[in-house]
């Protein structure tokens, strides 16, 4: 008799208000853990300086976004800060079929849609230690106009109210500590029997 190990990929949802630092934590996870594939979203917002097409996002027109909705190509989509964002299904299915883990950096509306569609996900909510800190980080990032910063801060109140819908929360007051916490969550979740199932097989 031998032991066969059946592995299944994990769908990891990471949400949190703009400026909480979830983008940085996602990048750190992808660099440090090669078992993860990033789910590259489609969006109708303009690229920011330095963003790479097909890596950060696929930047598409509203007409193309609508086409993807019509052809049922999106696992979820939502309007966030006035722009459309969506998660293409195909890449996720392909990655999970290859037993990869898949990382979704999506807002709480999108996260709720995924949670309603499947039981098989792990969800983490990242928060900054305070609203003052959120504002400071958004201003320092210098990527948004002042009205856009206000819009993102207002949205943060609504986002944070949904924290109880997630499995885990990480407070990002120190990025290295926050990353260690995220790694602990991810590593424990990898060992769950739904994803890592040793079974005895007759030789
Ligand atoms: P940003 O414009 O700063 O890149 O992202 C704004 C927000 O949109 C972030 O909270 C991010 O997590 C969210 N987001 C990015 N991609 C998706 C997606 O495919 N679906 C949903 N629902 N939200 C997304």
Image: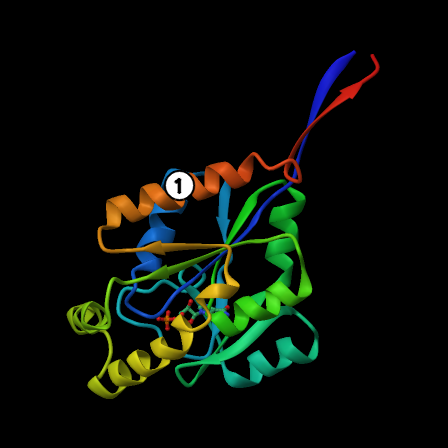
Which residue is located at x 25 percent, y 88 percent?
147
* Residue density around tag 1, few if under 14, some if 14–19, many if 20 or more, within 10 Å: some
Which residue, as the protein is rendered here, is positioned at the far front? 164
Which residue is located at x 41 percent, y 78 percent?
158
Q: Is residue 188 above or below residue 21?
A: above
Quadrant hosting residue 114: bottom right
Q: Is residue 6 above or below residue 68?
A: above
Q: Quadrant of the N terminus?
A: top right
Quadrant hosting residue 199: top right
Which residue, as the protein is rendered here, is positioned at the far bottom? 147
- Residue 67: horizontal and vertical position, in percent? 63, 80
Q: For mark 1, what is the residue? A: 183
Nearer to me, 162 or 80: 162
Q: Quadrant of the C terminus?
A: top right
Apparent side of residue 199 relative to residue 189 in the rendered image (left or right): right
Which residue, as the protein is rendered here, is positioned at the far right? 202
Apparent side of residue 69 relative to residue 173 in the rendered image (left or right): right
């Amino acid at each position: 008799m031998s032991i066969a190990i059946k592995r299944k990929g994990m769908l990891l949802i990471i949400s949190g208000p703009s400026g909480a630092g979830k983008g940085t934590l996602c990048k750190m996870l992808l660099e440090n853990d090669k078992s993860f594939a990033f789910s590259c979203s489609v969006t109708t917002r303009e690229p920011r300086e330095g963003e790479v097409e097909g890596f950060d996002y696929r930047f598409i027109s509203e007409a193309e976004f609508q086409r993807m909705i019509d052809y049922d190509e999106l696992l979820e989509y939502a309007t966030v800060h006035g722009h459309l964002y969506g998660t293409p299904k195909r890449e996720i299915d392909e990655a999970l079929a290859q037993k990869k883990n898949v990382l979704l950096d999506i807002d709480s509306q999108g996260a709720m849609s995924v949670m309603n569609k499947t039981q098989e996900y792990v969800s983490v909510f990242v928060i900054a230690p305070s609203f003052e800190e959120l504002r400071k980080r958004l201003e320092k990032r210098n990527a948004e106009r002042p009205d856009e910063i206000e819009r993102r801060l207002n949205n943060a109140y609504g986002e944070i109210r949904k924290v109880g819908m997630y499995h885990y929360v990480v407070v990002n007051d120190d990025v290295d500590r926050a990353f260690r916490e995220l790694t602990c969550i991810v590593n424990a979740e990898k060992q769950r029997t739904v994803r890592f199932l040793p079974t005895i097989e007759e030789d």
